[in-house]
Image (tube, rainbow, N blue to C red):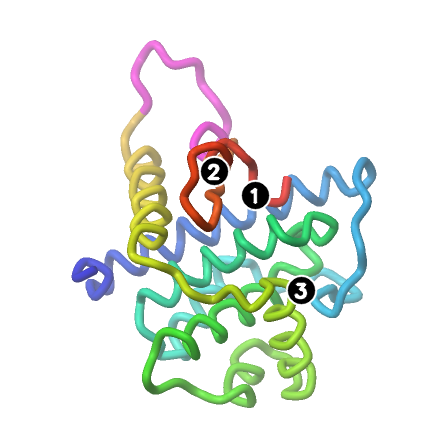
């Protein structure tokens, strides 16, 4: 999509996507005591100090992958969350999931891309760890990497709608809500076949 080539559009999209993912991670942090969660190779011993937004913008700045890769990475994260319900996205694994999903998307989408060692450096991890993360992510996805145009459009359109809602001031009759709670309260995820029966499910929550 041509508008993704606009740096301003991509900057806003990266900012919104990071906010969306942060809300999901924070929600799952709160739910960790109420649902079974496995520890995986994506989990760090501590929460990374770099904010999700800064981390995702760092990946965008240095990865030099096509803008579409970030939409595809978003699709991959959603697929991963649906296929691995015991590994919800949280503050301990979100950074590793982000760098891995973008790298896998770049390899699948782009003709030219950086190797694992470069992505490891961008992500602040070792090449060995990056290799392990890639393998686990691929198996977590069931190697389902293809994203057809309809799926791509569905996810991108959702992000566009939510960004527009954030930019528009609330109507006077709307009860006040803190921050962006109203727009990010529910993250819709979509089945891989775009079947409408699953469009009300919540990503990793």
Q: How many marks?
A: 3
For disc 2, the marked residue is 188
Q: How far is the residue under mark 1 from the one under mark 2? A: 7 Å
Q: Which mark is residue 148?
A: none
The percent position of residue 11, horizontal first and vertical second, equals 32, 59
| Front one among 36 and 121 | 36
Instruction: Tell me if mark 3 has few (under 14), some (14-19) or many (20+) residues whose alpha carbon lies within 10 angstroms of its own.
Output: some
Which badge, 3 or 1, comes first in the chain's sequence? 3
Q: Residue at x 62, y 48 (%)?
A: 25
* Magenta-tinted stretch: 170-183
Q: Secondary structure at mark 1?
A: loop
- State the SS at label 2: loop
The C terminus, quarter of image: top right
Packing grade of label 2 (10 A; few <14, some 14-19, many >=20) is some
Numbered mark located on residue 203 in the image: 1
Q: Provide residue 15's location: percent of width, then percent of height.
A: 40, 54
Image-quadrant location for residue 24: top right
Q: Main secondary structure of the magenta part?
A: loop
**Disc 3, SS:** loop
Tell whether position 186 is magenta.
no
Name which of mark 3 and mark 2 comes first in the sequence. Answer: 3
Q: Quarter-wise, where is residue 170 in the image?
A: top left
Residue drawn at (64%, 83%) of the image:
131
Q: Which residue is mark 3?
A: 48
Residues at circles 1 and 2 in contact by the CB criterion of under 8 Å: yes
């Amino acid at each position: 999509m041509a508008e993704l080539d606009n740096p301003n559009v991509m900057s806003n999209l990266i900012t919104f996507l990071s906010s969306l993912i942060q809300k999901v991670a924070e929600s799952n942090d709160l739910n960790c005591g109420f649902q079974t969660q496995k520890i995986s190779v994506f989990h760090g011993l501590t929460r990374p100090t770099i904010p999700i937004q800064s981390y995702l913008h760092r990946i965008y700045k240095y990865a030099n992958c096509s803008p579409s890769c970030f939409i595809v990475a978003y699709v991959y994260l959603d697929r991963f969350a649906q296929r691995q319900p015991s590994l919800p996205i949280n503050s301990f694994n979100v950074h590793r999931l982000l760098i891995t999903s973008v790298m896998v998307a770049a390899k699948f989408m782009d003709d030219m891309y950086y190797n694992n060692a470069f992505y490891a450096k961008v992500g602040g991890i070792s090449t060995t760890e990056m290799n392990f993360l890639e393998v686990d992510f691929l198996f977590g996805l069931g190697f389902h990497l293809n994203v057809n145009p309809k799926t791509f459009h569905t996810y991108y359109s959702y992000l566009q709608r939510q960004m527009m809602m954030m930019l528009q001031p609330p109507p006077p009759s709307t009860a006040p809500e803190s921050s962006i709670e109203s727009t990010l309260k529910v993250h819709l995820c979509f089945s891989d076949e775009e079947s409408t029966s699953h469009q009300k499910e919540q990503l990793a929550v």
